[in-house]
Structure formats: structure tokens, C-alpha cells
Image (cartoon, helix red, strand yellow):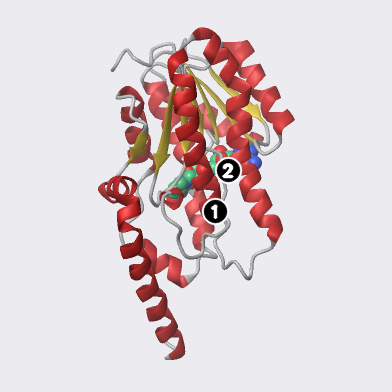
């Protein structure tokens, strides 16, 4: 076990499920105190029990806070309570997020507002609530969970991609502002991950989006958590958990025209199959 995370305080929004919970489990196994923030009390308490099981020592604290991250006052209250209990976060992970795939012309404007409010502003609120305590300690690591959809615009994700693109700008700008004060910033670009969110979005995902995602099996949350924790250890700014995402984030502006052509051909293929009554 690495000593790096021993007795560190980790705050994770969305820590009761999926990528957030898997990262909480891994960091608990490496000695950290864990505070998770999400809305549903039953899910929070089930996750707490799991994280307690994963701890390296029973002296590690696992705390839960119920808050809607898209509401600033609720986030401020939850983060302040976590800091009062366990001190300034050594690691702050913003994983709470949502996605509802569909076509721009079919989706209500309220969905665009709601998705931006949670994925982008929820991240801003969380960092705002914790940053002054981190700056005062002159240390800490902020990790924002974005998506491959934060690197490339993807068919069916018009309400989602812009929220993750916004995180990318936030992470880049914030990184250089806080670096002189000893606070680090990372951004994570997962591809499909086998979580309740993916299961939910698959119910309404357009056929075109499914085909663009390809047939590769989604990654497990544990694999993504390991990439995140390794990235924190190595102080990597941009973290990806597989080669496709690594190449996409490195070469995004170069591959954009190629990906556009690739997506156009898939969309044309779906139209052809639909016209032929195959789907
Ligand atoms: N799964 C993927 O394929 C994938 C790929 C790329 C990026 N991502 C990103 O990874 C992050 C985590 O996704 P996941 O797949 O791990 O999802 P998940 O398993 O559904 O977990 C989402 C977590 O966020 C919490 N949450 C949702 N809305 C919230 C709100 N308004 N306020 C506070 N907490 C809230 C949920 O708990 P409550 O519902 O109880 O609040 C839960 O703990 C998201 O930002 C997502 O966009 C996921």
C-alpha cells in the first residue's frame, strides 16, 4: 500500500455510485478518510458501509452528506460540514453528473439548463466551497470528472457535450491560477463505464450514438478509479483510462475531421437500415 493517501481527507461528489464510489473504495483501501456527497440517503448509507469494508484501518472516517450539487447553498453546507469534520480536502473529486441522450430538436431547453446546472455549475459550486481551505493549506488536488464527450461533439449528446467542454475550460484556466499556491488540478476523460448512469442513458440512446460508441465493452468503474488514482499520484493534468481516450485527448483537433466523417458514415448507415426496415 502506498503511503501517499494515508490519513488524507478525500471529498467526492457523486461518491455513492459508479466512478465516484469506485474511487472512494480505492482511496479508502489506501488509507484515506472519505467524505461522500450525493442526494439519496439510502444510497449514501449503502456506499458508506461498502467503503468502511474497504478501509485499510478502522480508524479511517467515512462520512456522508446529502445535498443536491446543482443547488449552491446545499453544496456550501455539505462541503463546510465535511471540512468541519475532517479538515480541508487533500483531494476533491467532482463526479456527480447527469446525461440524457437525444436529438437537439426533440429535447426541451430545460434539459440543457438542468444538465449545465449540475455538470458544470455543480462542479463550480463544489470547488468554490472548498478552494479557500485548500489555498490556506497550500496543498490539495482537485479532480473533475469530464468525459470523452468533453473532447469531441458526439451525435445525440448536444445537452451533455457542452457541459463537459465547459469543465475542460474550467480545469485548464483554474490549473494555472492555483498552481503557484500548491493546489493541483486534473481532469478525467472516461469513455463508456459500466455504471447505473450508463444503464439509464442506454435506454434512450439513439441508435446512431450506440454505433458511434462501438462494440467495445464498457470499462469497469474500478479500472477507471485506478486510472484516476494513478493520475493523482503522478500529478497528471489530463487523465484517461484507455488508449482511445488518451489518443483522442492528445490529437482531438487533428482527429476531429476524421471523426466527423466517421460519424457521418454511421449516421447514413442507420438511415439506410431504417429505410430498409432493418431497425
Ligand atoms: N458512466 C459512463 O459511461 C461515464 C462516461 C464518461 C463520463 N462519466 C461521468 O462520470 C460521472 C459519474 O458518472 P457515473 O457513471 O459514475 O454515474 P452514477 O453511477 O449514476 O453515479 C452518479 C452519482 O452522482 C450522484 N448525483 C447525481 N445527481 C446529483 C445531484 N444533483 N446532486 C448530488 N449528487 C448527484 C448520484 O447520487 P444521487 O442520485 O443519490 O444524488 C451518484 O452518487 C458523471 O459526471 C458522468 O457524466 C460517466
Residue 204 versus residue 161 in the image, above or below: below
Which numbered tag is attached to residue 47? none
Viewed as shown, does residue 165 lie left or right of 252? right
Q: Work out whether residue 11 can be spotted.
A: yes
Quadrant of the image for the N terminus? top left
Residue 48 versus residue 108 in the image, above or below: above
Mark 2 residue element = helix
Indicate the position of residue 171 as horizontal and vertical percent values.
47, 34
Q: Nearer the viewer, residue 261 or 65?
A: 261
Indicate the position of residue 97 as horizontal and vertical percent values.
56, 43
Q: Residue at x 70, y 23 (%)?
A: 77
Q: Are marks 2 and 1 in contact (CB under 8 Å)?
A: yes
Q: Residue at x 66, y 24 (%)?
A: 78
- Neighbours of disc 1 within 10 Å: few (<14), some (14-19), many (20+): many
Viewed as shown, does residue 1 lie left or right of 268? left
Viewed as shown, does residue 9 lie left or right of 3? right
**Residue matched to label 2:** 119
| Cβ at disc 1 under 8 Å from ligand 1 | yes
Indicate the position of residue 8 as horizontal and vertical percent values.
44, 14
**Residue matched to label 1:** 160
Quadrant of res 210: bottom left
| Cβ at disc 2 under 8 Å from ligand 1 | yes
- List the single residue furthest toward the bottom: 276
- List the single residue furthest toward the right: 73
Q: Residue at x 53, y 13 (%)?
A: 135
Q: Nearer the viewer, residue 22 or 229?
A: 229
Q: Residue at x 45, y 48 (%)?
A: 150
**Ligand 1 quarter of the rendering:** top right
Residue 83 versus residue 125 in the image, above or below: above
- The numbered mark, 2 or 1, whose residue comes first in the sequence reads 2
Amino acid at each position: 500500500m502506498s503511503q501517499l493517501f494515508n490519513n488524507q481527507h478525500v471529498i467526492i461528489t457523486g461518491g455513492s455510485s459508479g466512478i465516484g464510489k469506485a474511487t472512494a473504495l480505492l482511496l479508502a483501501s489506501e488509507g484515506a478518510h472519505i467524505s461522500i456527497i450525493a442526494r439519496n440517503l439510502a444510497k449514501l448509507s449503502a456506499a458508506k458501509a461498502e467503503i468502511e469494508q474497504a478501509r485499510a484501518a478502522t480508524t479511517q472516517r467515512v462520512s456522508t452528506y446529502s445535498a443536491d450539487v446543482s443547488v449552491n447553498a446545499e453544496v456550501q453546507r455539505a462541503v463546510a460540514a465535511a471540512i468541519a469534520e475532517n479538515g480541508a480536502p487533500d483531494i476533491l473529486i467532482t463526479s456527480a453528473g447527469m446525461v440524457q441522450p437525444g436529438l437537439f430538436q426533440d429535447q426541451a431547453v430545460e434539459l440543457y439548463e438542468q444538465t449545465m446546472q449540475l455538470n458544470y455549475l455543480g462542479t463550480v459550486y463544489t470547488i468554490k466551497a472548498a478552494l479557500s481551505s485548500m489555498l490556506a493549506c497550500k496543498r490539495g488536488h482537485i479532480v473533475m470528472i469530464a468525459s470523452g464527450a468533453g473532447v469531441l461533439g458526439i451525435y445525440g449528446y448536444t445537452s451533455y457535450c457542452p457541459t463537459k467542454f465547459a469543465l475542460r475550460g474550467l480545469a485548464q484556466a483554474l490549473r494555472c491560477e492555483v498552481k503557484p499556491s500548491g493546489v493541483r488540478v486534473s481532469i478525467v476523460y472516461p469513455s463508456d463505464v459500466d455504471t447505473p448512469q450508463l444503464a439509464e442513458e442506454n435506454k434512450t440512446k439513439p441508435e446512431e450514438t450506440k454505433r458511434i460508441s462501438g462494440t467495445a465493452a464498457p470499462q469497469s468503474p474500478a479500472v477507471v478509479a485506478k486510472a484516476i488514482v494513478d493520475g493523482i499520484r503522478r500529478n497528471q493534468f489530463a487523465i484517461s483510462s484507455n488508449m482511445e481516450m488518451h489518443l483522442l485527448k492528445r490529437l482531438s483537433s487533428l482527429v476531429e475531421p476524421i471523426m466527423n466523417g466517421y460519424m457521418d458514415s454511421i449516421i447514413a448507415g442507420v438511415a439506410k437500415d431504417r429505410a430498409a426496415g432493418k431497425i
